[in-house]
C-alpha cells in the first residue's frame, strides 16, 4: 500500500513539473508566435472625381406591342401564366428601360481594380433577371437558378470565351468572369428558347442601365470630356460627348425613334 502511494505521488509530481515547464498541450503552434489574423478585405477604390452624368433615354413614336411569351412547353415556368417580351419596355414620359449606358472614351490610360462583390444574374419564372446588366472586367458574375426546373446558361460572346453549363436544381449557383471588355455579351437558355439577357463588360465602373422611366446616373467621374454610348437590344447604339469639371454634374439625354 505504501509503495502504491509513493508511485502515485511521483506521477503527480512529474505531471505538475511538466505543466510548469510547458510540457502539456501547446496553446500555440510550435516554433514561435501565434499565426497572424487574416487580413481584412481591401476597401473599394475611392471615386476619382466628383462629377455625375445623368440623363434620360426616350423612345419617340408608338412603341411596338410586346409579344406574348408562351411557356406551355414547361408548366413549371408558368406560376403566373404567360408573360410578355422585355425587348422594348417604355415607361412614364416615354422613358426607355434596359438601355446600357457607359463611358466609351475619355478615361485615358487609367486602370481600375475589379470589384470583388459579384453581379447577380438570376433565373426566375424562366426569365433572366435582370434582362440587361453591367459588370467590370474580372468582376465575378454570380448566376443563380431560382426555378424548380432545369436551365442551362449559355453565354455567346464574340471577344470573351463562350460558356454553357446546366443548372438542373433550384438554388444552384455558378460564378463566371469575363476577361475582356465587350458590348454586349448575349445570354440564352437552350432549354427555354425565349430566355435572353445581355451583359455589358467594361474595364471601369462608369456604366448604368436605364430604369423603368428611362433615367440613368453615372457617378464619380473626373474632369474631362467623355464619349457616352448607349446600347439598346432593338434600337442599337447612340453616342454623345459630355464635358465635366470633376465637381459639377453633367447631362446627357438620348432619343431613339421607332421605324
Image: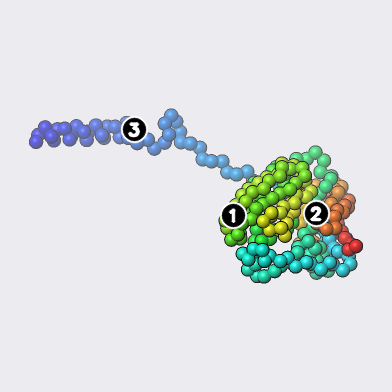
Residue 66 in sight here: yes
> Counting other residues with Cα less than 10 Å from the Cα at mark 2, is it few (<14), some (14-19), or many (20 or more)?
many
Separation of disc 2 and disc 1 at Cα? 33 Å
Which residue in the structure is indicated by mark 1? 168
Name the mark nearer the viewer: 2 or 1: 1
Q: Which residue corresponds to the image point at 73% horizontal and 55% vertical from the top-left?
A: 197
Residue 15, position in %: x, y? 26, 34
Residue 125: % across, % down: 65, 63
CA neighbours of label 3 inside 10 A, class few (<14), some (14 to 19), many (20+): few
Reading the image, the residue beneath label 3 is 22
Q: Secondary structure at mark 2?
A: strand
- Image coords of residue 171 (percent x, y): 57, 56
Quadrant assignment, res 53: bottom right
Residue 219 visible to an observer of this rendering: no
Which residue has dot 2 on it?
101
| Circle nearer the N terminus (3, 2) | 3
Amino acid at each position: 500500500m505504501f509503495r502504491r502511494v509513493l508511485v502515485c505521488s511521483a506521477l503527480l509530481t512529474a505531471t505538475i513539473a511538466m505543466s510548469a515547464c510547458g510540457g502539456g498541450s501547446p496553446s500555440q503552434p510550435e516554433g514561435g508566435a501565434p499565426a497572424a489574423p487574416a487580413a481584412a478585405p481591401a476597401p473599394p477604390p475611392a471615386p476619382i472625381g466628383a462629377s455625375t452624368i445623368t440623363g434620360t433615354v426616350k423612345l419617340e413614336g408608338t412603341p411596338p406591342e410586346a409579344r406574348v411569351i408562351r411557356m406551355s412547353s414547361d408548366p413549371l415556368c408558368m406560376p403566373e401564366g404567360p408573360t410578355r417580351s422585355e425587348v422594348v419596355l417604355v415607361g412614364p414620359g416615354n422613358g426607355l428601360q434596359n438601355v446600357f449606358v457607359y463611358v466609351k472614351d475619355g478615361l485615358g490610360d487609367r486602370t481600375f481594380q475589379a470589384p470583388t462583390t459579384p453581379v447577380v444574374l438570376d433565373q426566375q419564372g424562366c426569365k433572366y433577371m435582370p434582362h440587361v446588366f453591367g459588370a467590370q472586367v474580372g468582376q465575378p458574375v454570380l448566376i443563380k437558378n431560382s426555378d424548380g426546373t432545369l436551365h442551362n446558361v449559355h453565354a455567346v460572346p464574340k471577344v470573351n470565351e463562350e460558356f454553357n453549363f446546366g443548372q438542373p436544381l433550384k438554388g444552384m449557383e455558378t460564378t463566371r468572369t469575363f476577361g475582356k471588355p465587350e458590348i454586349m455579351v448575349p445570354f440564352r437558355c437552350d432549354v427555354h428558347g425565349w430566355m435572353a439577357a445581355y451583359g455589358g463588360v467594361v474595364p471601369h465602373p462608369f456604366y448604368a442601365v436605364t430604369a423603368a422611366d428611362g433615367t440613368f446616373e453615372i457617378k464619380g467621374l473626373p474632369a474631362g470630356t467623355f464619349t457616352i454610348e448607349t446600347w439598346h437590344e432593338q434600337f442599337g447604339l447612340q453616342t454623345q460627348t459630355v464635358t465635366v469639371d470633376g465637381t459639377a454634374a453633367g447631362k446627357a439625354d438620348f432619343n431613339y425613334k421607332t421605324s
